[in-house]
Every structure is written in C-alpha cells, then in structure tokens.
Amino acid sequence: MSAVLLVGTGQVGVRAARQLVDTPGLDRIWITSRDASRAADLVEAMGERAAVHPSARGPRPQLPDGVTGVAAATGAPEAYRWVRAAVEAGVPVAVVVDDGFGELEATATERGVAVVTGCGLGPGLTEVLARHAADTFDVVDEVHVARVGAAGPACIEAVKDARRETPGEWRDGAWRTDRAFGPELLWFPEPMDARECQLVRNGVAACIATVPGVRHATSRLGAPPTVGRFRRGLGRDPKDQGWGAARVEVSGWRDGRAGSVVYGVVDRTAVVAGVVLAVTAAGLVGGVDAGIAVRAGVRTLGEVTAPVPFLTELGRRGVKAAVFEGVVPH
Amino acid sequence: MKNLRRGLLVAFMALLAGIVVRAKGRSPVPPTSGGWRELEGPELR
C-alpha cells in the first residue's frame, strides 16, 4: 500500500493535494495543516481517498499509521518538524524547503531514509533541467539558473530574504562573493519574456550537488511579486500575480566543441511547485514511475532524479519545459 | 507657511521628475534572435 501524508494547505499544498489524489498508484492521502478547518475543507474537496490528519503543535508530530511517504508543502520551522518526524519514523520525505536539513543527514543515512529537499520550481525543477542539459555534454563548464515569481506569501518572503542576503557564486571549486553584483536582464519563455534578475546564493548549492565538477554556477532571482494594492497599481506587470518562470543555461563541451543549452518553463508558480512536490513524493513511495531514486540521506531533487521520466511525468500533468533555439540571449 | 509652500513645491517637482523618468524609462524589450520550443519526442528519451 502506498499512502502519503501531505503537510500544508497553502498555495502549493492545495495543488499538491490535487496531484496526489489524481495519482492512481496512491491508495491513501492524509492532509494536515495548522489550519484544521482548511485541511478539512481540502479533504472534502479531494474525495474519499483523502483524510485529515490532526496537526500536532509539539516538537515531535506523529505520522499516521501506515503512511509510506511525506510531502511537506510548508515553510520553516514547520517543515523541519515534519521532516525530522518522518526521518525518525523511517519514512521517505519530499520537502519544498531546500536548506537547513544538514543536521538530519547522519540520522537519515543511518536509518536508510530518503530526504529530498527543494521540490519546487527553483530549486527543484531547475536542477532537473540542469541535469537534463548537462547530460548532453561530455564536460560541463557552467550552470546558471534563474527564477521569477513566487507561489504564496511565504514564498514571497523567502524570495525577499534571498535577495537581501549577500550573494555568492561557485567558481573553480570555491565560493566567491567579492564581485560587485548588479541585476541582469534574462529572457524567460513567453509570456514572461525579459526580466531583471539579481544574483543570489540560494540555489547555487543545489546546482553544484546536481552537476558535480561544474566550474562556474550561479543562481538569480527576479523581483518578488508585489502584494499591496497600492504598489500593484504602480505599473507592475499583471503576470507577476501568480505566474512564474525558470531558466536554466548550461554550457560545456561535446565532441571537442563548445556549446550551450537553455531550458525554460513558465506556468503558475504554485502549480509547478505542487506538481513537482507531488510527483517526487509519489515517486518515493512507488506510486508513479518518475525516475526518482530512493537514496538514503538528505539529497536535492536534481541528485536523485532521472530527468527524462521525471519531465515526461510532469508533461503528462501539464507542466511542460521548453528549449531555447537561436542565439542564446543574456 | 513659507516652509510649507517650499516643501509642497519640492514634492511637486519630485513627482513631476518621477513621472518623466518613469515614462522615459519604458523602453521596448530588446529583440532576441530565436525562440522557445516545447521539449518533446527524442529530447525526452
């Protein structure tokens, strides 16, 4: 029996719930949230295979009996509590949060539990696309990822935090922060088109883990969507309300010749993140064949995913990646 | 009163300057050579 516990009923959680329920290989879906009434409403909408699991306020929440996987669509510190609980119960877990799980590495490895972090648009799908692009080269020199958009209020705050932090990039085997960084105009698939994106540290570690040996890796984030009615009225693009896009540029050497590949994706940010999280969780419990390798320890999505079956499954669920053809725009 | 008037004048000029800069700053996106195509078929094998 395959049964998944979904934690969180925010923008991503709602989308992930629908995707989990629509996965025939899953027998049972429990939903838990700090907002019990919202969890109950969501369960009612999801049908008879879904059930509410009561949320625990303490440091050690209990998993339902018979659960075989956890999908955590919630931010810190809630995500850490549930991931820790899953590891202690020996249950594999997929989580949208991408850092702060280092202390669980030893326990997860010792207990043989897979913890897949950063299961969203970026980090997440961006690393799968980076791996897919890297597989077309003999040697990979550079990986550059960029994202615009945010799923919900928590995600918007995370983007703001990431843009406030000291930026960093990976170059020649070491972190570098000694450059004067400014925003760069990057092209995303239509209708997002050109957006100014700022260099950030967030997401670079996932790139390095996904494409080991890469010489130069960077991550960029666009300005977060504005949520205030007054600021929204000052000329912001309406696509910022819920839409998101990611862009992955990989360059390297193939048959002795230099080249580069640019992949992109555009959709509702919450939809992409929900699909990525649900497919990863379902893949971990064997509910769907999405090329997810169940490897003990804390891993990024790019590390454990075979890109082709994963992207095929995403495409089947309506999230389709694109490739840029032409002169690579910077 | 004089200070208030002076302040209002400065605010008005700042507003005008903001409008001019905003209007002038709306340049079209530079053209790119190429386009995006959905990944399909052999690219997903």
Image (spheres, coloured by chain):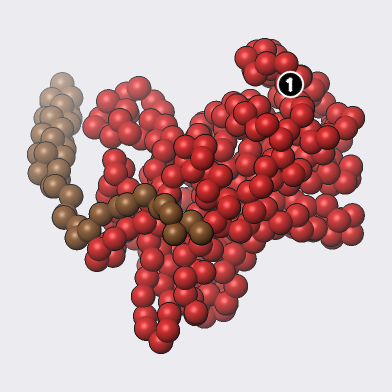
Chain colours: A red, B brown
Q: In screen coordinates, is A212 left or right of A251? A: right
Q: In screen coordinates, is A288 left or right of A156? A: right
Q: Tell me where residue A211 sits by quadrant.
A: bottom right
Q: Residue at x 68, y 31 (%)?
A: A24
Report the quarter where the C terminus of chain A lies: bottom left
> Of A196 and A228, which appears nearest the observer?
A196
Q: Residue at x 79, y 33 (%)?
A: A3
> Of A269 and A241, which appears nearest the observer?
A269
- Placement of A31 over or under A102, stated as above or below: above
- Placement of A92 over or under A250, stated as above or below: above
The amino acid at mark 1 is Arg
Where residue A189 appears, as percent x and y from the top left, is 32, 48
Q: Residue at x 38, y 30 (%)?
A: A241
> Of A329 and B28, which appears nearest the observer?
A329
> Of A288 and A205, which appears nearest the observer?
A288
Where residue A224 appears, as percent x and y from the top left, is 41, 40
Answer yes or no: is residue A196 visible: no
Q: Which residue is mark 1?
A: A49
Q: Residue at x 39, y 25 (%)?
A: A228
